[in-house]
Amino acid sequence: MVQLGRFRLDLISDGFFEDEADTFVQLCVERQGPRLRARGKPRIKVGFNSLLIRGGGHTVVVDPGTGDKPRSDKVKQYRMEWPRRFFPTLTTLGVTVETVGAVILTHLHWDHAGAATRKTESNNLVPAFSRARYYVQALELEAAREAVRRGEDGYDAGDFEPLSEHGCLQTVSGESEILPGITVRLTGGHSRGLQIVYVESEGQRAVFLSDLVPTPAQLPLDCVLSYDEDVPQLRAAKEAVLTEARERGDLLLFVHAPRVRAGYLKSQADGTAAFESIDLG
C-alpha cells in the first residue's frame, strides 16, 4: 500500500504464470538473445498486478487481470496459478464489486481485461463490476475487434463485448481525465491502443505503466517483448514517459513484476538513471 496525497494505492497480485524467458523478457536481441537461447529457452515466473485506487470519494480498479472464467488452455500453456487472487484480495481489503465506480483497462488483452466480465449461473457474460463505467481507448477497442475477427488469441470478445452490450463501456481518445487526479495517456506500441494511468495528488504522482514497461527488467530503452506490435513507437513512448518520470520523481508501478513491483528512477552524478525499488508491504 502507498499513500499518495489523498489517494490510497494498492497493487494487488492476481497470481503468477510462466513464460519463455526470451519471449517475455526479450532484451535487445543482440545483447541478450544468444545467452537466453543457449540456456534452452528457460521459463520464468511472471506476475500480474492490478491497481486499486481509493480516495476523493472514488474507488477505481485498473486492469483487474485474468478473471475466473474458464481458461483451461491458458492455464496449461502458461502454468497459471489458479484460481486467481484478485477478487479474494479485493474482499480482504473491504472492497466489493458494487463499490467500484470506474474500471480502467489499459488494453484488452485477456490477461489484463479478462476479469472485466463474469459468467452468471445461467452461463451469460455480464460486467463483473455491476455499477462501474469501463474506460478504454477507442483505438484499442477497434484493434481488439479486428483481432477477434482474424482469430488471434490475444483478445477474447467475451472480455469486452458484454460491456458494450450493457452500455457501460466508454471509449476515450488520447490523453483523458477519468476522474479528478486520475488521467490516462495513449502510448500505443505494445498494442495499438495501449494507455497508461497517472494518479496525482498534493504534488505527488504515480504512473501505472502497464505493458509499456511491464517489469523493471524492461526499463532499458532497447528492452521489448516479443508481443509488442510497434517497437519504434513503444521505444519512443517509453523514452518520453521515463524521462518525464525521472524529472518529476514519479512513482513507477509495474504490472507484470513478480517481486520488485514499484520504485523510482533516480538521477546519478554521471547523468545516468538508477532504479530504486520500494517495499509495498
Image: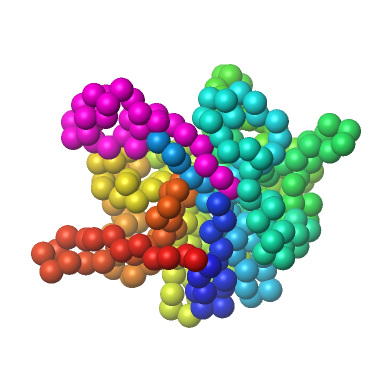
Q: Position of residue 211 (x, y in %)?
A: 44, 44
Q: Position of residue 78 (x, y in %)?
A: 52, 30
Residue, x 26% and y 48% (percent of image)?
A: 220
Q: Which residue is outermost to the left?
A: 270
- Does the magenta run of residues contain 194? no
Residue, x 29% and y 41% (percent of image)?
A: 223
Q: Which residue is outermost to the top?
A: 151
Q: Nearer the viewer, residue 124 or 244?
A: 124
- Does the magenta run of residues contain 29? yes
In the picture shown, does residue 196 fall above or below 146? below
Horizontal side of 93 relative to 30 (left or right) equals: right
Q: How many marks?
A: 0
Residue, x 66% and y 40% (percent of image)?
A: 83
Q: Position of residue 252 (x, y in %)?
A: 40, 60
Residue 30 visible, this orientation: yes
Q: Which residue is outermost to the right?
A: 122
Quarter location, residue 277: bottom left
Q: Position of residue 254 (x, y in %)?
A: 44, 53
In the picture shown, does residue 200 fall above or below 188? below
Quarter location, residue 146: top right
Q: Nearer the viewer, residue 134 or 29?
A: 29
Q: How is the image coloured?
A: rainbow
Residue 135 visible, this orientation: no
Residue, x 76% and y 45% (percent of image)?
A: 127
Horizontal side of 104 relative to 165 (left or right) equals: left
In the picture shown, does residue 171 fall above or below 74? below
Q: Which residues are magenta?
A: 14-43
